[in-house]
Image (spheres, helix red, strand yellow):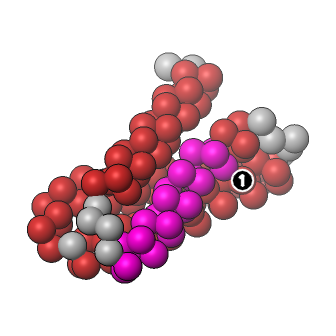
C-alpha cells in the first residue's frame, strides 16, 4: 500500500470516528452534566480528523508534526471525556468501550506517525 492510500484510510477512519462521536452525542440523555460533557467530547473528538487533514496539507515537516501533535492531544483529551461519559452514564457503559478504544487507537497511530517522522528528519 502506498503512502497516499494510508493517508486516505486514516482520513476516512478519523471521519468515521467523528460521525460516531456525533451519534453518541445525540444518543445521550439530556441532563446538565451530559450537556457539558457532550460539548467537550464533540469538540475534541471531531478535531482529531480536522487536524490530521490539515497535517496532510502541511507546508513542511515542522508544520506536519505540529498538526499531528495537536491531533494526538485531541485524541487523548477525547478519551478523557469519553471515560467521564461512561462513568456518568452506567446504562450506556457497555456501548462506550468501543469508542473509547478507538480514541486510544487513534492516539497510538498518531504517536507512531510522529515518532517515524522525527526519525526521518534526523536522517536528513
Of 19 and 8, the residue lying toward us: 19
Considering the image in quadrants, where does the C terminus appear? Answer: top right
In the depicted structure, whether residue 4 falls above or below residue 56:
above
Residue 112, visible in the rendered structure = no
User: Residue 122: horizontal and vertical position, in percent?
Assistant: 77, 53
Q: How crowded is mark 1: few (under 14 residues within 10 Å), some or many (20 or more)?
A: many
Q: Is residue 105 left or right of residue 111?
A: left
In the depicted structure, whether residue 15 falls above or below residue 84:
above
Residue 32, visible in the rendered structure = yes
Q: Mark 1 points at which residue?
A: 67
Residue at coordinates 83% horizontally, 53% vertically from top-left? 62
Element class at badge 1: helix
Residue at coordinates 42% horizontally, 41% vertically from top-left? 19
Answer with the quarter of the image where residue 118 lies: bottom right
User: Residue 28: horizontal and vertical position, in percent?
Assistant: 29, 61
In the depicted structure, whether residue 104 falls above or below residue 36:
above
User: Residue 88: horizontal and vertical position, in percent?
Assistant: 25, 78
Query: What range of the chain is rendered magenta?
Result: 32-52
Tell whether position 57 is magenta.
no
Residue at coordinates 41% horizontally, 71% vertically from top-left? 35
Tally of numbered discs: 1
User: Residue 43: horizontal and vertical position, in percent?
Assistant: 56, 60
Answer with the quarter of the image where residue 85 lies: bottom left
Q: Is residue 123 left or right of residue 99?
A: right
Answer with the quarter of the image where residue 17 lies: top left
Residue at coordinates 58% horizontally, 66% vertically from top-left? 73
User: Quick one: which residue is furthest to the right in this view?
Assistant: 59
Amino acid at each position: 500500500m502506498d503512502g497516499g492510500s494510508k493517508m486516505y484510510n486514516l482520513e476516512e477512519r478519523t471521519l468515521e470516528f467523528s460521525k460516531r462521536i456525533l451519534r453518541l452525542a445525540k444518543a445521550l440523555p439530556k441532563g446538565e452534566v451530559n450537556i457539558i460533557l457532550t460539548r467537550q467530547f464533540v469538540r475534541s473528538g471531531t478535531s482529531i480528523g480536522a487536524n490530521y487533514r490539515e497535517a496532510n496539507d502541511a507546508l513542511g515537516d515542522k508544520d506536519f508534526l505540529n498538526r499531528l501533535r495537536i491531533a494526538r492531544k485531541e485524541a487523548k483529551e477525547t478519551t478523557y471525556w469519553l471515560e467521564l461519559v461512561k462513568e456518568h452514564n452506567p446504562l450506556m457503559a457497555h456501548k462506550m468501550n468501543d469508542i473509547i478504544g478507538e480514541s486510544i487507537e487513534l492516539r497510538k497511530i498518531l504517536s507512531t506517525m510522529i515518532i517515524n517522522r522525527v526519525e526521518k528528519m534526523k536522517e536528513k
